[in-house]
Amino acid sequence: MMKFFDKLFGKKEKAIVRSQDMANTAPLTEEQIQAIVSGQSPHFDMQQLVAGCGQSVGKQRELNEDSIMALTATIAGNSGNLPFGLYLVADGMGGHQFGEIASNAAIRSVSDYIMKRFHPYLFHLKTEMMEEPFQEIMLGAVREAHKVIQREAPGSGTTLTAALVIGQQVTIAHVGDSRAYFVYPDGRLDPITRDHSLVKRLEELGHLAPEEAQNYPHRNVLYRALGQGDFLEPDIFTVAFPQPGYLMICSDGLWGVVAETDIQRSVIEAPTLQRACQNLVTAANVAGGPDNISVVLAQLIG
Amino acid sequence: MGEGDSSALRQLQSGATLVNRYAIQEVIGVGGMGSVYRARDMHFPNVTKLVAVKEMINSAPDPLVRQTIVQNFEREANLLATLNHPSIPRINDYFTIGSRSYLVLDFILGKDMEAIINDTNGFLPEEQTLGWAIELCDVLDFLHKHKPDPIIFRDMKPSNVMINQKGDIILVDFGIAKTFQTGMKGTMIGTEGYSPPEQYRGEATPIADIYALGATIHHALTRRDPRIEPPFSFAERPLRRINPAVSAELEAVINTALEYDPENRFRTAAEMKQALMGVAKKTGALARIKAATSSIGQIDTIKPLWSFKCEDEIRGTSTVLNGTLYVGSYDNNLYALNAADGKFKWKYPTNGGVVSRPAAYDGNVYFGSEDKRLYAVNGISGKEVWTYHAEGPVRSSPRIAEGHVFIGSDNAYMHAVNINTGRLVWRFEATDAVRSTPYVLNELVYVGCESGDFYAVDFRGALKWRFHAKRAITSSATSSDAALFIASLDGMLYALDPRNGWALWRFRLGKASISSPCVVDDIVIVGASDGFIYAVDAHSAKEIWRFRTEHQVNSSPVAYKDSVYCGSVDGNLYCLEYRTGRLRWKFGTEAAITGSPFVYDDIVYVGSTDHRMYALLA
């Protein structure tokens, strides 16, 4: 036990113990330990990242062209433990053009690229700081996936919304019309991504009113998609994880079908994230389930 | 994927010969479906006849998709074979080997317009771009008048325009072919950013090509790539705001071509050509008028409220406390001046240059000197309170927090000194001289050093984390909710997580920087030795604007109200709108400004190496 404390607090602690009467070696009281620990503990407290996910083919499609990925871990380091999370949703583009191949390739290729970068930090005793910034890793991953899709299923494409959580920072890479939201306990549901769809752009420019947008015939036209075109510029940015709050990533099978107030309520009222995801999927199916449904929810506790 | 597949995707190597005729020399372009090669036509053994061989690899597993791709390929070949125009490449041959199809075209010795834009420093001259635009109208007019059916190019963009050695344009890549389906999630035909709104709905008309031509010229004149901007956002990037050298006449023509509603654009390419010819004629005369009525006259009339002359250069920054301005000079003195009128109050002599920025706190002024000392002096009387020996020249500025003065020294330590007694509390060993000013946030002290290391140290002097840049970090950190920002001599602006030092992003500056960034409204603004002041989005690292000065920017920008103030070695103090980078005014001094301005109560204070301290209305 003392050895453990020595390790924890270094030589100074040892010197204090030695200077005292050696016969009197009563263990430290709980208060004393707490005082020492609170004095030693980092100023940024340890946090816990948790996540849930849900998926459904929906009620009107035969094929699931969405792909998801949710990976939560901890980077154990000398200066404390860091929450690590990688959450992806990809929605493949329709019909005979192999949307499911595209969304699958996107998820696998992006995860592979990112996890290779973080592998030494998660599984080896790596102490040097990573030189490559998060945003460059995300960009590299998306560009690689773009090439893979063009090779594996030319002509096809997919949306991709990816979130890399390290500590309290969320780095998002986004292409297409899947969405990332921050959901706050006070009822706000803030989309943090911007759809790369024609209808959204026309709405932004004021050429379409929101109610017209609902029935716009070219609702599904994307102007940016993974696998499409020679040049791909994903939206990449870093924001602080909402605390308190949730990160939600979903395909349009959820956000285009379930009203925002219902999404917000499902998330906040559910006892667990996993249950919240199930409730969201059910809500989309109850509303007709016209498209594949995918959702990932994450929360940073502490 | 099996090995066979990946070998099928491999580029042809130089030395390979296709159909016993085309000897591949090198790859000159790479597209989504294959490469373009320069090859020699071996049917002309006695002369070197070069050709461009465009390859298309059909690796689609689905037979229907494969068939469509082949049909589109043949359509491009057949189309090119029927066209005869100096701006359209001639096709010599086409053939298919296994899953690869090839078009053999005239080789164009030159560069594509996108490469020219990227390789040019600053903006392309208007006349040159105008010339290209006129030639592009010509070739579009030719295509649109094609009989029996007009040909719509559908993919006008800089990378599809080659400029040959004579400076003439040649349109390349007639290979657009994607079927458009409604109902399914799909994309449009053409290239995002250059294509007009109606093309996203699947309509392609001659007027769509006119929009894309407008977008191409807009890109050439502004260097703003529309592919990384939201579609149809040209109106948010007015030509002349980004490149003031463009004539109002040309801007008007490009705006007409870029009208959202096709009805409001030019009806034909010929009509647009006429308008461009009109610009060419007019601006020739206009150039002379413009020089005479320059608007710079107004900008130069800024007069200082007061100025004060020291005995040597002012290289550092000033600070104001209770109506007194404190500034150090290379003449070894710290000066106290009346901030309202510049009247001399007192000076405190040290034995070395005072090049950093004094800190004022609780009636005292704290400053370092190249004589290796940190001084605490009474702000009113100029009497010494204490001095601290830092064992090396002090070029870092003091930072005061929690009863400590934190300061770096060239002896490779950051010192934490008790603010009342001037005694050392602890010191932190860096790997090289510490010239960066410590920055305090959430009970951590952040400081850089000349080896490129950047440290986060807690209030007891224990290292929390370390970040390493490739070259010195002389500038100081700043932070927003988003991150901690630092610039380095390695030419990067870094965003780090203040809690753990992981890098969120880095932004490449043109050259090394010793300027400390400032953040306002999630815009990070910093100077660099390439002469630019940069503004970068704090979350996405996207450049928002850059402003060119005439020399290195070593000064640190300061935001105040809706402006940002920054000095340059060109001798000017610049006042820019911080959201757009637009110049509000500039004030010229007689020599380089290396220190940073200080703004207080609507007055900007700046020192210059012309030995003077200036006060200007903000």
Image (cartoon, rainbow, N blue to C red):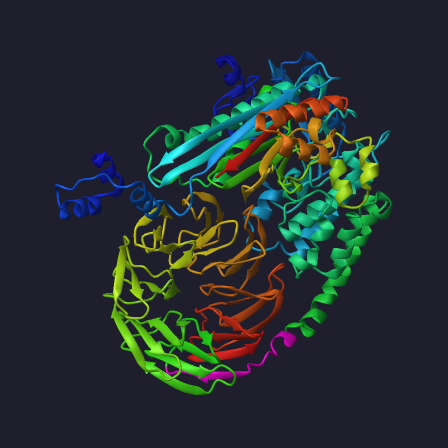
Q: Is residue B306 magenta?
A: yes
Q: In the shown orientation, is residue B539 left or right of residue A92? A: left
The x and y percentages for residue B47 are 54, 30
Q: Is residue B439 above or below residue A54?
A: below
Image quarter (top left, top right, bottom left or bottom right) of the C terminus of chain B: bottom right
The stretch in magenta equals: B297-311
Q: In the shown orientation, is residue A159 left or right of residue B532? A: right
Number of on-image labels: 0
Q: Is residue B312 above or below residue B560?
A: below
Residue closest to the eye, A91 or B41: A91
Q: Is residue B322 above or below residue A159?
A: below
The x and y percentages for residue B23 are 52, 24
Residue A66 visible in this rendered orientation of the protein: no
Q: In the shown orientation, is residue A151 left or right of residue B236? A: left
Residue closest to the eye, B249 or B486: B486
Question: Which of the 4 image quarters holds residue B286?
Answer: bottom right
Question: Which of the 4 image quarters holds residue B113?
Answer: top right
Q: In the shown orientation, is residue B208 left or right of residue B381? A: right
The x and y percentages for residue B442 are 43, 53
Residue closest to the eye, B282 or A121: A121
Question: Which of the 4 image quarters holds residue B122?
Answer: bottom right
Picture residue at 60% right of the left edge, 38% below the top: A233
Picture residue at 40% right of the left edge, 41% below the top: A131
Residue B302 visible in this rendered orientation of the protein: yes
Q: Is residue B215 magenta?
A: no
Q: Is residue B400 above or below residue B84?
A: below
The x and y percentages for residue B586 are 57, 72
Residue closest to the eye, B217 or B331: B331
